[in-house]
Image (tube, rainbow, N blue to C red):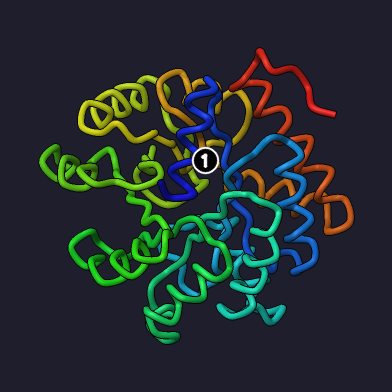
Amino acid sequence: MMKLTRAVEDLRAKGRKGVVPFFTAGYPDPATTLRLVAAAQQAGCEVVELGLPFSDPIADGPAIQASSQKALAGGMTLNGALELAAEAARSGVALVLMGYVNPLLHMGMERFADRAATAGVAGLILPDVPREESREIRGLLVQRDVAWVDLVARTTPLERVKVITADAEGFVYLVSVTGVTGTQAPRADEVEEFVERVGCHTARPLYVGFGVDGPSLARAMTRRADGVIIGSALVEVIERAGPAAAPVAVRTFLDEVQQAVNPTEGSRP
């Protein structure tokens, strides 16, 4: 069983909802990125998404775009992000990279897959690569025990949902709104229907992302879904706090989300 699949299935077996924070590699700086991952683990997050900075992140809203630009301006590269990923993964967290295909093509798909596997990466999300064009990179990753995470939108036709989820790995990423990340809040009733519709065609855990901005919405999203992914809201927490205070602020925010979606667990030390 792949590392990512094992992590999310273990959460499900324990009756826990997953909380997956997103951090941009190198934002606000590389050292703080590692401290943020550690803070997330302290808050009980067993899966963390690490964004690979890119100059044209088409799926990302203003907050994540700004964090990506700042990371690039600070000198972050794909090589640097993979080095950060290797350091973060040593802690045992299931690390999922989220990026765009052009930098990977520049590095070379096989070399990237080798580097990701060596770094201990558990999964990869590439929102600009359609399922039909993913065969090469997906095959390279699967050979190296790295999961390819599929995205399904509310507008995805049913037949396509069946194809995408037929051999899904790790979890299925449900895009809760139309548009980019962090720009609008999803409606709980629509997401519940979406989760039920996709859940009829896969046994994999279903995680909801795009627009989940805090504890209340996370609780609503996980009435049916197995977990939530939170990105833009965390970037805003980091931006407000500044590098020195960001890890504590992130820990506090994620503690509140965990208490909302896993209320029987109590607070963590």
Where is residue 84, by image quadrant? Answer: bottom right
Displayed quadrant of residue 73: bottom right
- The residue that appears at 73% across and 46% down in the rendered structure is 237
In this rendering, position of residue 109 left or right of residue 223: left
Residue 177 location in percent, x, y? Answer: 38, 40
Q: Is residue 182 left or right of residue 243?
A: left
The residue under the point 38% across, 73% down is 101
Amino acid type indicated by mark 1: Ala
In the picture, which quadrant includes the C terminus? Answer: top right
SS class, disc 1: helix
What residue lies at 47% left-to-right and 47% top-to-bottom? 4
Q: Nearer the viewer, residue 257 or 13?
A: 13
Find the residue positioned furthest to the front.
1
Is 163 placed left or right of 68 in the picture? left
Report the residue that reaches farthest toward the top. Answer: 264
Residue at the image point whose x is 36% and y is 40% from the top: 174
Left or right: residue 225 versus residue 161 is right
The residue that mark 1 highlights is 7
Residue 240: horizontal and vertical position, in percent?
78, 50
